[in-house]
Amino acid sequence: MKKTKTGNILLHVYLWAFYIILNYYLAYFQKLNNVLFVDYLAKYLLVVPVFYINTIWVLPYLFKRRKYISLLFAEILIALSHYCLFLVVYTNLLPFVSNYPQVNIDFAHFFPRTFWWYFNFSLYAFGYWYAKEAIEKQKEIIKLQRKNFMNEFNFLKLQINPHFLYNTLNTLYSQALPHSAALADNIMKLSNMMRYSLESIDAEDGKVLLEKEIEYLKELIEINQIRFSNKLNIVYEESGQLNGQLIPALSLIIAVENAFKYGDLKDKENPLLIKMQIQKESINFYCKNKKKKKMPELSFGLGLINLKKRLDYVCSDRYTLNTSDIDDFFIFELTILNE
């Protein structure tokens, strides 16, 4: 980053040096009267600050934000400061440090001359800044297009792979059923989970029946028990009556999935505790698990952010979500008010 910034500064210095020398020699070969290099150098060194003050400060912070009154005052202040600097340099500094002739101050001639230089390089600054802004916008558009393309591509992969897996599981179920009913049943659980995931993703309003979400949750618990030979300590409690309640898709799953991934579920005294309370006014979900002693790198933060976005979209202000990551336990609490 430092090298890039230094390189840009040097590039500007080289371009200004080339521009000053080029203009001097053009005037020299045209045999204009009183062609002095110190005169050209002084003029350009006085207008360079005008160029950069406009491009770095005035245009981005005043013109771009439509602060036109402040912009007018700023330009007047810069013009007056530029005029005063011209006076000081041409009446005192140049005659003192070189053989530049003494200048007689003629306001009617000197002020329009300095203002013309100021006006020209203010226009150059605007052209440079506008071109730079246009290039940056084009880069942002290209970046956004590339991001959208990757999102569409990843979404396409997401659509293809689950459907392929879902169909394959159904085939495996048919093949396993004559040999092992238990194996076929477990394959069907996986197939049901896959189907639910696909259907919930495809839901237009982002909502699913609470009953379906709970079925998925129970199958998730059963599949993980099978993975770990029924050695996981899990307490699942459910109260209340299902009555067509709707909730955001997969909103109960993230906490349980992370409990299986990061939790110590083999401690009999501290089982994974899942509580579902279905009330007339609300749906309350509680999940508490003991954390592993050696925790891998957590990815729950990203999942939680995505969940909040979905809850904001579907439930707006009808939910509360609280998480506690203290001592040896992680607690997830979600309350959704019924519509």
Image: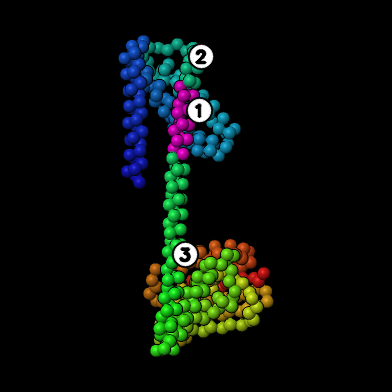
Q: Position of residue 176 (x, y in %)?
A: 40, 85
Asked whether 133 falls inside the magenta stretch, the response is yes
Provide the residue span drawn in magenta: 117-134
Q: Quadrant of residue 147?
A: bottom left
Instruction: Write down the residue under mark 2.
Output: 107
> Are the two marked residues, 1 and 2, in contact with CB atoms closer than 8 angstroms?
no
Residue lying at 63% horizontally and 74% vertically, measured from the top left: 245
Instruction: Write down the residue under mark 3.
Output: 302
Residue at disc 1, secondary structure: helix
Residue 78, numbered label: 1
> Are the two marked residues, 3 and 1, in contact with CB atoms closer than 8 angstroms?
no
Q: CA distance from mark 3 to mark 2?
A: 67 Å
Residue lying at 44% horizontally and 89% vertically, measured from the top left: 181
**Kind of residue indicated by mark 1:** Ile
Q: 285 above or below 44? A: below
The image quadrant where one finds the C terminus is bottom right
Residue lying at 33% horizontally and 39% vertically, measured from the top left: 7
Mark 2 closeness class: few <14, some 14–19, many ≥20 residues within 10 Å: few
